[in-house]
Image (cartoon, coloured by chain):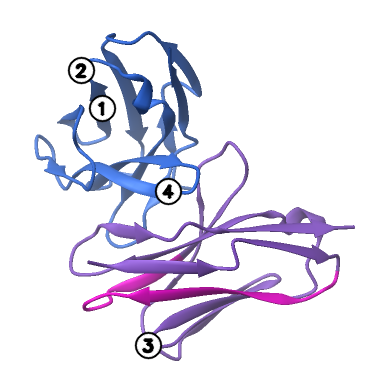
Chain colours: A blue, B purple
């Protein structure tokens, strides 16, 4: 079975804090993705990576950055958290077309 | 720009009452169409990939079909455990997915 894990299920942070969301996959997948999911807006792609140390902007990259130092790990960084970044964050990995998702991190920024 | 529209937004069914969900799409060069199931507070769970018009796939009470403009997810004789949000997504020239907003299905016993 494909296993994608995310470091936290729930996080509460203050405005202006630097936030790290970690994602790990154990299937040696090349591709990894970060999405956010908001009611009425669906899943929106923030960043993705096709290889180690490689990253590409998705549809809504503003206010976020990513890091992929190892193939199995893809980190999402909120440099200075803001209240409009309160959301459900979902990580996914894929060998080719099909993406497999982690359980999600629900982030609340106060 | 790829567009995916799912209907209806919400569907309430009686146990055993079969129905269908619709996913209409506009994409340049469809690479694949994907169906996912998402339970509240959890990540999407992969169900099916469809690659070409006329293709069908089945899993238990679910059957997905694909035409050149839309896909249907048929739920046959649903049970309460089929209650979830069903997401449709399309993939074009690269590995990125464009998602619809989802259909929330509630099955009453």
Sequence order check, earlier mark of 2 and 4: 4
> Around disc 2, counting alpha carbons within 10 Å, would you say few (fewer than 14), some (14 to 19), or many (20 or more)?
some
Chain of the residue displaying label 4: A
* A89 on left or right of A71: right
Quadrant of the snapshot with the N terminus of chain B = bottom left
Viewer-nearest residue: A106 or B54: A106
How many numbered discs sit on the rendered protein? 4
Residue under numbered circle 1: A75
The mark found on residue B62 in the picture is: none
Gap in angstroms between the C-alphas marked 1 and 2: 12 Å
Q: Same subunit under labels 1 and 2?
A: yes
Residue under numbered circle 4: A41
Gap in angstroms between the C-alphas marked 1 and 3: 37 Å
Residue at x-position 50% and y-position 36%: A103
Q: Same subunit under labels 1 and 3?
A: no
Q: Nearer the viewer, mark 1 or mark 3?
A: 3
Gap in angstroms between the C-alphas marked 2 and 4: 23 Å
Residue B75 visible within the image: no
| Magenta highlight range | B16-34
Viewer-nearest residue: A30 or B55: B55
Residue under numbered circle 3: B68
């Amino acid at each position: 079975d494909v296993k994608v894990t995310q470091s936290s299920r729930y996080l509460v942070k203050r405005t202006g804090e630097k936030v790290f969301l970690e994602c790990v996959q154990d299937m040696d997948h090349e591709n990894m993705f970060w999405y956010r999911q908001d009611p009425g807006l669906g899943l929106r792609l923030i960043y993705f990576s096709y290889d180690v140390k490689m990253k590409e902007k998705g549809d809504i990259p503003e206010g976020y950055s990513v890091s992929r130092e190892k193939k199995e790990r893809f980190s999402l960084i909120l440099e200075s958290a803001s209240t409009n970044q309160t959301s459900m964050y979902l990580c996914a990995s894929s060998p080719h077309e099909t993406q497999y998702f982690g359980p999600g991190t629900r982030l609340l920024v106060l | 720009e790829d567009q995916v529209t799912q209907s209806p937004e919400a569907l309430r069914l009686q146990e055993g009452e079969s129905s269908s969900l619709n996913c209409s799409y506009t994409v340049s060069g469809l690479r694949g169409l994907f169906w996912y199931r998402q339970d509240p507070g959890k990540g999407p769970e992969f169900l099916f990939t469809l690659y070409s018009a006329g293709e069908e796939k089945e899993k238990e009470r679910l059957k997905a079909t694909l035409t050149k403009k839309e896909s249907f997810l048929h739920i046959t004789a649903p049970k309460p455990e089929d209650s979830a949000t069903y997401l449709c997504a399309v993939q074009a020239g690269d590995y990125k997915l464009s998602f619809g907003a989802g259909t929330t299905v509630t099955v009453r016993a």
